[in-house]
Amino acid sequence: MTNSSKLTKKDLNGVFLRWATACQICWNYETMQSGGVVLALGPALRKIYTNDEEYKKAIDSHYTFFNTQPFMGNIVLGAALAMEEQSGNNDFESTRSAVTSIKTGLMGPLAGVGDAIFFVIPFTIFNAIAAYMGQEGSPLGIAIGVLFGFVLLFLRKYMFTMGYKEGSKFVTTLSNQLKSLTNSANILGMMVIGALVGSVITVTIPFTFQQGEVSVALQSTIDMIMPNLMPALVVGFVYWLLGKKGMTSTKVIVAVLLLSFVGYITGMLG
């Protein structure tokens, strides 16, 4: 049975502070930031789900792959927490699916935005100014760096609050559209994954068929049939492996590393 009481401001601040200070805790190649997510949401979920079994299931559902730019993660966690609080009191299983879909759908697009807006550009500009002033002997260089850090902390808190408020709207004023929203988030997540397959994964076959004066590169022929076919096949193969009994993400990573090493040494892969 779930708890119908609202989370207090202290609860929300606790979630934000835990994520802001330890979002990368227990980072790993299987689930990446899931440890930080569970650490941040755990106490709040305990208050929402007073039933031990529901609490365990809620925690387990957040121990899944999650990786985004830490600043933008405030928005995702805020929205997820609001959905846990509002929907969890009515339909536990549907809440699990909706929260997972929202996290999966938002983490990729927001990561790209966050890296550029809240990390690369501002850190480059302000830290360069602070470093130059420090080299010139001005103590304001340190002050600018510290002040910039506090500004970013304020922005992170604002984004968490915004995510929490918008997440509440999903399950109150937009409750009838929640199923469509979940489906849209699923589609968005799959589109992001599909784009990453073609842009991040690189697999080439350097074979060239020679017949007289005519030579045909196998990779060029494959690209004419379907660009990025080899990365898609590799992802499909990895997905198939993960479905095998006793197979883990770590074992798959080791297998892919060994296959890549052997393929490069033998010249079968480029």
Image: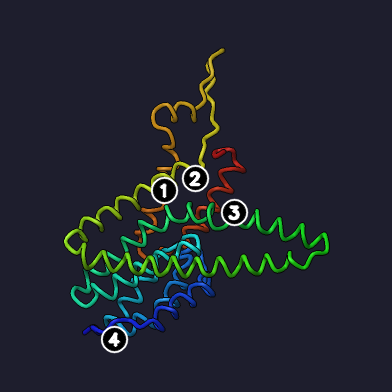
In three-dimensional space, the C-alpha distance between marks 1 and 2, rounded to whole angstroms, equals: 9 Å
Kindly identify the residue that appears in the image at 63 percent across and 68 percent down: 147
**Helix, strand or loop at disc 1?**
helix
Q: Earlier in the sequence, mark 2 or mark 4?
A: 4
Residue 52 is tagged as 4
Circle 4: residue type: Asp
The residue tagged 3 is 120
Instruction: List x then y, in percent, for residue 230.
Output: 44, 39
In three-dimensional space, the C-alpha distance between marks 2 and 3, rounded to whole angstroms, equals: 23 Å
The residue tagged 2 is 201
Q: Is residue 230 left or right of residue 139?
A: left
Instruction: List x then y, in percent, for residue 60.
Output: 35, 74
Instruction: List x then y, in percent, for residue 96.
Output: 27, 69
Circle 3: residue type: Val
Circle 2: residue type: Ile
**Helix, strand or loop at disc 4?**
helix
**Helix, strand or loop at disc 2?**
loop
In three-dimensional space, the C-alpha distance between marks 4 and 1, rounded to whole angstroms, equals: 37 Å
Residue 107 is tagged as none
The C terminus: image quadrant = top right
Q: Badge 2: how crowded within 10 Å, few (<14), some, or many (20+)?
A: some
Of circles 4 and 1, which is in front? 4
The N terminus: image quadrant = bottom left
Q: Is residue 168 visible?
A: yes
Looking at the image, residue 118 lies above or below residue 44: above
Of circles 3 and 1, which is in front? 3
Query: CB under 8 Å between callouts 1 and 2?
Result: yes
The residue tagged 1 is 235
Q: Badge 1: how crowded within 10 Å, few (<14), some, or many (20+)?
A: some
Kindly identify the residue that appears in the image at 52 percent across and 25 percent down: 217
In three-dimensional space, the C-alpha distance between marks 3 and 1, rounded to whole angstroms, equals: 30 Å
